[in-house]
Image: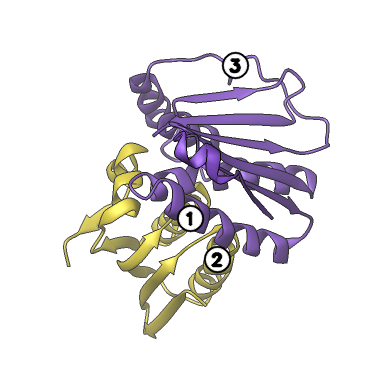
Chain colours: A purple, B yellow
Amino acid sequence: MMINKNDHDIVLQEYEEINMLDIKDVEDLVRAQMSISEFLERNVPILASLMEVAVNEAMNNGFFSCGRVNVKTKRIGGKLIIRVKDNCQGFNTEKVNLQLKKEIYEDEFEEMLEAEGGRGILLMKLICDKVVYNSRGNEVLLMKRI
Amino acid sequence: MKHSIEISGNHAEVFLNDKIYVNDASLLRNDLCEIIDQGVTDVRIDLSGLTYIDSSGLGTLVTINKRTKERNGRLVLTNAQGLPFELIRRTRLDKVFIIEDN
């Protein structure tokens, strides 16, 4: 579903595109992957492939931990904002909400070279300008300046 | 299917195409673990056709790297380029994988 603001706003350079996805099964997930890719290609062609990684990481975390996830991608002016939300119990977000310098994330990758999983949140933080979880840990907001 | 596998003896040549999302990464992991269980020890994965990977696909590569090493074999990645190569470098996995130009 897509909602485009009226021409008045486009003239004012406030062009906005919102895309909402409700993912309930693997088929929805595959459709969402395509839809997110197209949204990013349309709105932020230069950043599309890296941002696609960040959004998929957030969506996969929600979907595989909860079984159902909502993804809202939005471009407002110079910002791309993605909210990913599930309705499960979440997790302790104290550590992941610390905003560290990008170099620190690379050190963290260094410490998990043999790990078969667990890189998703670090990748989101490496790619985005902001990654913020709500206190319950069932919703994450990604922000990228464009 | 976004991967194809050619087996000869204990060697396998794997070609990845297009975008490897979480569902594709899991199919790839299953197929490669199966051929390793059947005796393949040396796996070469050609990344020239790959345009997307994320932590799920990287996790699959780490798994295959481990499984081949356990059997005294090895995983070699070839033709790494674009986004996949950038992610391999930024996650420092270039220290873990054997990466060849061709």
Write down the chain letter for disc 3: A
Residue B51 is situated, as x and y percent measured from the top left of the image, at: 36, 61
Q: Is residue A135 visible?
A: yes
Residue name at image x 73 percent, y 17 percent: A135
Residue A113 is situated, as x and y percent measured from the top left of the image, at: 41, 37
The residue indicated by pointer 1 is B57
Helix, strand or loop under label 2 = helix
Residue name at image x 77 percent, y 22 percent: A136
> In front here: A107 or B63?
A107
Location of residue A41 with respect to A84 vertically, above or below: below
Residue A20 is situated, as x and y percent measured from the top left of the image, at: 69, 48
The residue indicated by pointer 3 is A95
Count residues near mark 1 (Cα–Cα under 10 Å), then give few for <14, some for 14-19, many for 20+.
many
Disc 2 and disc 1 in contact, CB within 8 angstroms? yes
Count residues near mark 3 (Cα–Cα under 10 Å), then give few for <14, some for 14-19, many for 20+.
few
- Mark 2: amino acid: Asp
The residue indicated by pointer 2 is B24
Quadrant occupied by the C terminus of chain A: top left
What's the distance in space between the residues labelled 2 and 1, CA to CA? 8 Å
Give the mark nearer the N terminus: 2 vs 1: 2
> In front here: A60 or A78?
A78
Which picture quadrant has residue B101?
A: bottom left
Q: Is residue A117 visible?
A: no
The total of numbered circles placed on residues is 3
> In front here: A138 or B76?
A138
Residue A52 is situated, as x and y percent measured from the top left of the image, at: 48, 48
Write down the chain letter for disc 2: B
